[in-house]
Image (spheres, rainbow, N blue to C red):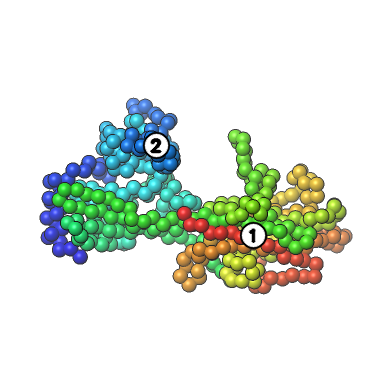
């Protein structure tokens, strides 16, 4: 820990000699809308400091600066130039300097951090009200929260900041993290929220100040599923995509499917996974496909742990806050034999270690027990689902007329 008198002397010298541009105070950068007299720009302008021969950098900056007009938060002083705006890691559209879809760390010359975290920093989007600093003091709360950004401003000596001295610099280092919900079932635990961790620094000397983002941990995308089941049943994943304006992805998802060469397929947390189980090589319109239990495991062994239920007795697992959605099928579904199919939509998740409650970087497999039913007067082969909580089966049940079909591998990839 550096001697505090030494730190104070350095801060005074820094205030006299600092060459960096001043950053607007909290009261200024909380102006959320441009003034009515300012012309509205629809095209994002890229600062001239980005070399034209670096298309990847230009594309990344363009995406970061694509903030909706009503969500822009002013960065820097009014009237700031494009060059000065770029120097403090912000975006410029010709008239306005504003924060981009990322994490922006700035060091004010009077010895304060400004940290602005965008909702779009992670995929899926970060829940801004879950973000917090290491320190628990009241002064460590955000100074501003909008739908798209959370804004912190606090002294570099507060909120749990660690202070060190190296090579003529006083280094102030802090960390920010997010909380996330964990759902715990009888056979495993999962999460669907982004898990965010940010390490950042301000370095002060008598002539300069540097803001550094050391590391950002976001949460991840996940991967695929597809699958050939036993002889006459198959579990596969729909990959149909919208190609015309106004199209709804759910309407076209089952128009095409992943094949073996497409795997692994990356999915992001909470992205929909379109699952279909179907009967193969049968043309009898009277038979009905029924599903029993559908569940996920972290290995291809359908009895391995951890596990997470998706369907119980053919119905969505009610203890899951993001319950599986059953897709109704009838004569208008465009299928020759709609009773030969079952479809459902799962919101992607990651398995979580039940002791540490940390996400596991593992693979995921989906399994379903299925059977072919022949309707009779007493049994119409209908599966009726109620909202009442159902008991979870602790073992995979397979009767003499049911089989298990499994998906291909889902690979968890953290962004």
The residues bearing labels 1 and 2 have C-alpha atoms spaced at a distance of 41 Å
The percent coordinates of residue 178 (x first, y second) are 41, 58
- Mark 2, Cα crowd under 10 Å, few <14 / some 14-19 / many 20+, is few
Q: Residue at x 80, y 57 (%)?
A: 288
The percent coordinates of residue 91 (x first, y second) are 35, 38
Q: Residue at x 64, y 71 (%)?
A: 303
Secondary structure of the residue carrying numbered label 1: loop
Which residue is labeled 2 in the image? 53
The percent coordinates of residue 409 (x first, y second) are 61, 60
The percent coordinates of residue 391 (x first, y second) are 65, 69
Query: Which one is in front, 199 or 246?
Result: 199
Q: Residue at x 23, y 61 (%)?
A: 163
Can residue 213 be seen in this snapshot?
A: yes
- Tell me if residue 373 comes above or below residue 103 in the rendering: below
Query: Which one is in front, 111 or 211?
Result: 211
Q: Choose mark 1 or mark 2, whichever is in front.
A: 2
- Residue 105 located left or right of residue 2: right
Q: Residue furthest front?
A: 53
Picture quarter with the N terminus: bottom left
Q: Residue at x 50, y 65 (%)?
A: 360
Give whichever of discs 1 and 2 has the lower sequence position.
Answer: 2
Can residue 316 be seen in this snapshot?
A: no
Secondary structure of the residue carrying numbered label 2: loop
Which residue is labeled 1 in the image? 408
């Amino acid at each position: 820990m550096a001697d505090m008198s030494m730190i104070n002397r350095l801060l005074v010298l820094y205030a006299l000699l600092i060459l960096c541009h001043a950053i607007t105070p909290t009261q200024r950068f909380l102006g959320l809308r441009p003034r009515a007299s300012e012309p509205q720009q629809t095209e994002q302008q890229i600062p001239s400091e980005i070399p034209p021969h670096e298309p990847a950098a230009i594309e990344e900056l363009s995406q970061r600066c694509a903030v909706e007009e009503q969500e822009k938060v002013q960065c820097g002083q009014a009237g700031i130039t494009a060059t000065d705006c770029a120097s403090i890691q912000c975006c410029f559209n010709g008239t306005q300097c504003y924060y981009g879809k990322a994490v922006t760390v700035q060091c004010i010359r009077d010895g304060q951090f400004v940290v602005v975290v965008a909702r779009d920093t992670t995929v899926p989007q970060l829940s801004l009200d879950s973000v917090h600093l290491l320190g628990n003091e009241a002064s460590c709360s955000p100074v501003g929260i909008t739908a798209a950004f959370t804004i912190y401003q606090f002294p570099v000596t507060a909120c749990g900041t660690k202070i060190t001295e190296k090579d003529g610099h006083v280094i102030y280092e802090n960390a920010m993290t997010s909380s996330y919900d964990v759902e715990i079932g009888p056979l495993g635990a999962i999460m669907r929220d982004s898990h965010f961790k940010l390490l950042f620094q301000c370095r002060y000397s008598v002539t300069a100040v540097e803001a550094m983002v050391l590391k950002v941990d976001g949460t991840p995308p996940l991967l695929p599923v597809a699958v050939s089941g036993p002889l006459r049943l198959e579990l596969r994943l729909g990959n149909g995509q919208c190609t015309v304006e106004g199209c709804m992805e759910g309407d076209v998802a089952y128009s095409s499917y992943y094949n073996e060469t497409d795997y692994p397929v990356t999915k992001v947390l909470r992205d929909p996974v379109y699952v279909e189980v179907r009967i193969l090589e049968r043309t009898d319109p009277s038979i009905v496909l029924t599903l029993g239990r559908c569940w996920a495991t972290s290995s291809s062994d359908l009895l391995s742990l951890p596990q997470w239920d998706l369907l119980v007795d053919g119905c969505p697992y009610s203890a899951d806050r993001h319950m599986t959605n059953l897709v109704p099928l009838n004569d208008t579904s465009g299928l020759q034999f709609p009773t030969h199919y079952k479809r459902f939509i799962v919101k992607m998740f990651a398995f979580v270690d039940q002791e540490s409650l940390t996400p596991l970087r593992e693979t995921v497999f989906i399994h379903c027990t299925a059977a072919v039913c022949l309707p009779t007067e007493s049994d119409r082969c209908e599966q009726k689902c109620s909202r009442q909580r159902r008991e979870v089966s602790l073992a995979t049940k397979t009767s003499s007329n049911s089989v298990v079909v499994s998906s291909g591998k889902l690979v968890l990839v953290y962004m």
